[in-house]
Image: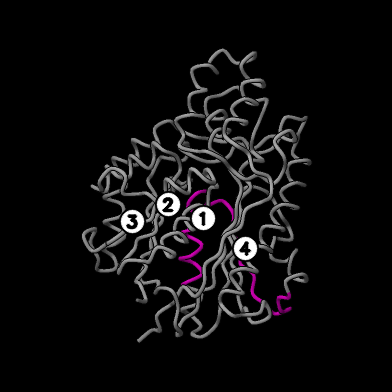
Amino acid sequence: MPHPVKLVSMATAVPPHVMEQRDVAAAATSAFAGRFSGFGRLAQVFETSGIRRRHAVRPLEWYLGALGWPERNAAYLDGACALFTDAAGKALSAAGLAAAEIDTIVTVSSTGIATPSLEARVAGELGFRPDVERVPVFGLGCAGGVSGLALAARLARSRPGSPVLLVVVELCTLSFRLDQLTKANIVATALFGDGAAACVVRAGQSGIASIAASGQHTWGHTLDIMGWSVDRQGFGVIFDRAIPPFAEAHIAPAIAGILARSGLMLEDIDRFACHPGGAKVIEALERALALGQGTLDHERAVLADYGNMSAPTALFVLERLIAAGLPARTLLTAMGPGFTASCVALQSAA
């Protein structure tokens, strides 16, 4: 009988600069209105996004300067290492562990390039052992936090008693582009924030919840729905306007299929914990999963306070659910590039 994998601790971190949505809207108007004829129609997204404020690794005025790939990635390395250290330190402390006791580190990040990867760059400061196993993961986008938790759980299950640290860091604001006069870029400017989340998982000991099952579903011929374009200025966002209706039409059958592989049904889930990609996405998920309007309250609260931070955002929702008291069975889910749905089923320890 395999040992159950437990979520031992959960922590989050954000960078120091707070961007109020009204200030970002004013800056975007100044930067785009005179050059982009469609900006006036698109500007309403700053009000309808459901976001009050976000956190960023640089002050707002920095993003209005002349930035290329070198400047953006330098900010990524600096900010991501700081957030990694902050989130990981909190998760380790909550688990009652020192960094030297961690056997495996899973690092998820898709908003910059770091080689050596982030966990290697902060190893000395945090105190990881020389023989710690490093598993950096790139390219999962918004699904990265959920997929990373699933991967960490599988690694922990393979070595009962061995602690695995998952750290998810995304600096989405570094993709703000003054040179791209597109709807996708304006929407990204209205939605994106920076943040990190970390947790410790371990098989064969007590914890917050058991990680009971996980799975993914990738739809064919959907590569152009979400992702990055890359040029000398940095990453450019790919957002298809069909994301909310696509989610509404397809997410429930995909989740049902993932659950069925573990002998579960949609009706077995007491609380769906979803990545809040935006206000329209949250509404689409409530309709698709036959939830009452307003059910995804923690998702709306996280979106309002932090914006869409990509991969860590679903874990911010999970943190709030843990604080409120997890129900018997929770399904953590997110959608990301691929186009992919990723799920982790959690069984409360209570």
Q: Name the quarter where the N terminus is drawn.
A: bottom left
x then y, percent, for residue 126: 72, 71
Q: Which mark is residue 144?
A: 1
Q: Which residues are magenta?
A: 127-153
Question: Magenta stretch: residue 190 in it?
Answer: no
Secondary structure found at label 3:
strand
Query: Is residue 327 shown above or below 285?
Result: below
Q: Which is nearer the N-term, disc 2 or disc 1?
A: 1
Q: Which residue carries the number 2 mark?
A: 334
Question: How dense is the environment of label 4, judged by Cα within 10 Å: few (below 14), some, or many (20 and up)?
Answer: many
Q: Which residue carries the number 3 mark?
A: 272
Question: Magenta stretch: residue 145 in it?
Answer: yes
Identified at 59% across, 54% down, the residue is: 138
- Is residue 93 shown left or right of residue 334? right
Task: Give the amino acid type for the residue marked by disc 1 in the picture.
Answer: Gly
Q: Which is nearer the N-term, disc 2 or disc 4?
A: 4
How much space separates mark 1 and mark 3, taking CA atoms? 17 Å
Task: Give the amino acid type for the residue marked by disc 2 in the picture.
Answer: Ala
Q: Mark 3 against mark 2, which lies toward the viewer?
A: 3
Q: Which is nearer the N-term, disc 4 or disc 3?
A: 4
Q: Which residue carries the number 4 mark?
A: 87
Q: Are marks 4 and 1 in contact (CB under 8 Å)?
A: no
- Is residue 279 shown left or right of residue 138? left
Q: Are marks 2 and 1 in contact (CB under 8 Å)?
A: yes
How much space separates mark 4 and mark 1, taking CA atoms? 16 Å
Secondary structure found at label 4:
helix
Query: Is residue 31 shown above or below 331?
Result: above
x then y, percent, for residue 75: 75, 46
Q: Can you tell which quarter of the image residue 268 is in?
A: bottom left
